[in-house]
Image (cartoon, grey):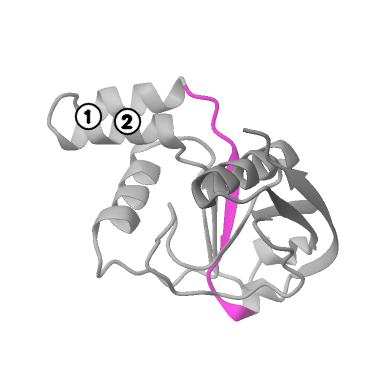
Amino acid sequence: MKVYHGSLIEVRNPEIRQGVHVGDFGCGFYVTSSLAQARRFVRLKCSREGAESGVVSVFKLDEKLFAPPFKGKVFTTPSRAWANFVLANRKKPDFSHDFDFVRGPVANDKVYTSFTLYEGGIISFASLIERLKTRRLFDQILFHTEEALACLSFIGSEEVVWQK
């Protein structure tokens, strides 16, 4: 299966990076099965960083990742468990997990509005889940360990130009 990583630079050799920014599923290396989503992410990064272009790196994913001995967590839809996992990764500095990979929906900016309403006590958890189910969410896969990352093989890239 082909997967895509959007960035300002080409990534031939992905790395597990621990950083200040923690994504929906924790620190690591993220890809999506949606080329359109990866392109959108590049444009968003260009806009935020003032860059004129970025790159979508393309990888072949060996699907042995989704079988033992790898330990993974898969969220097929926005659910209570998914929302709790995303909130824990985003809000709890000491939260960690021991999965090799995590796969599930992307919590985009519109989704974060719903999370903010929930955290502010404006909507209930049930309302949060219902709001999330009405959004078209793309998928993402987090590679959380070096062993999981070894299931990716670089196959090419494309430049994405951002137009203001």
136 above or below 152? Answer: above
Q: Position of residue 85 (x, y in %)?
A: 35, 51
Residue span colored magenta: 135-146
**Label 1 Cα crowd, 10 Å radius (few <14 / some 14-19 / many 20+):** some
**Label 2 Cα crowd, 10 Å radius (few <14 / some 14-19 / many 20+):** few
Q: Position of residue 37 (x, y in %)?
A: 65, 39
Viewer-proximal residue among 71 and 26: 26
Q: Mark 2 and 1 residues: CB-CB less than 8 Å, in contact? A: yes
Viewer-proximal residue among 95 and 43: 43
x 63%, y 41%: residue: 43
x 75%, y 45%: residue: 160
Disc 2 marks which amino acid?
A: Thr
Horizontal side of 86 relative to 40 (left or right) equals: left
Residue 139 falls within the magenta-colored stretch: yes
Disc 1 marks which amino acid?
A: Leu
Q: Position of residue 74 (x, y in %)?
A: 53, 51
Q: Which mark is residue 47?
A: none
Question: Label 1 belongs to which residue?
Answer: 117
x 61%, y 51%: residue: 51
2 above or below 115? Answer: below
Tell me the distance, in whole angstroms, between the alpha carbons under discs 2 and 1.
Answer: 6 Å
User: Residue 117 appears in which quarter of the rendering?
Assistant: top left
Question: Label 2 belongs to which residue?
Answer: 113
